[in-house]
Amino acid sequence: MPISPSSTTFVLIVGKYYFALHDLMRWYIKGSSYQVIAYNQNTSAIIRRYTVQGYADNSTWAWGQAWGIYGFAKMFDFTTQPQYLDTAQRMAKVFLTCLSSNGVPSYDFDAPTSNRPADTSAATIAAEGLFILSEAEAYLLTDTFKLAFKPTWDSILSNGTSDVPQNNKNTDLVYGDYYAIQAGNT
């Protein structure tokens, strides 16, 4: 449920996540994150990015990555600001790409293979974040369908186009209806 942009809560939450979005992310890895960031109390300049529980300061600690998926997905849920959805999606892509063959993440995705114990807690946090992401994407999909739905038509969707040269456009098409139903059942 979105929070009113005029509320104090909104301003505080968005401010916190804005800094996280820009400072915690390792953009050169396109969606990987640091565990901890230390700021100068007077200037807000970044002093250090590091890990406490991960393998190395520049590695991707699975819990941190999972919390990022969850937190940025929740931020999109609260604010509907697309940069949070984009960040959660990128973090999810990194997380899912780094999973071991059994589907359980290691505690740190960059740790040597000989030192990669599994971490089901990270898996659970990420799963909840992925669930929130799926709801956010369904919300966006629903808004898109609302634009295409016309109750006066014989189909679910209106304005389908199958063959412009034959002037078969702006009509109902079973193909669009089929995939609309598939998406709704996913």
Image (cartoon, grey):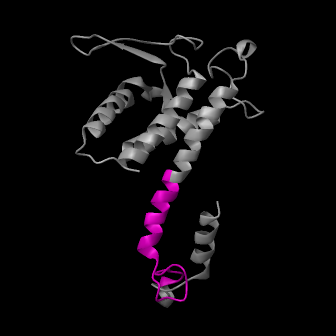
Figure check: 145 above or below 10: below
Residue 155, magenta (yes or no): yes
**In the image, 135: left or right of 26?**
right
Residue 25, image x and y in percent? 43, 27
Tell me what residue is drawn at x 46 percent, y 89 percent.
152
Tell me what residue is drawn at x 71 percent, y 17 percent.
116
Q: Quadrant of the C terminus?
A: bottom right
Can residue 98 be seen in this snapshot? no
Figure check: 181 above or below 45: below
Tell me what residue is drawn at x 51 percent, y 15 percent.
58
Residue 44, image x and y in percent? 26, 16
Residue 178, magenta (yes or no): no
Q: Which residues are magenta?
A: 136-164
Residue 173, image x and y in percent? 57, 82
Tell me what residue is drawn at x 58 percent, y 46 percent.
131
Residue 163, image x and y in percent? 52, 83
Quarter assignment of residue 84? top left
Quarter assignment of residue 120? top right
Figure check: 142 above or below 151: above
Residue at the farthest front position? 8
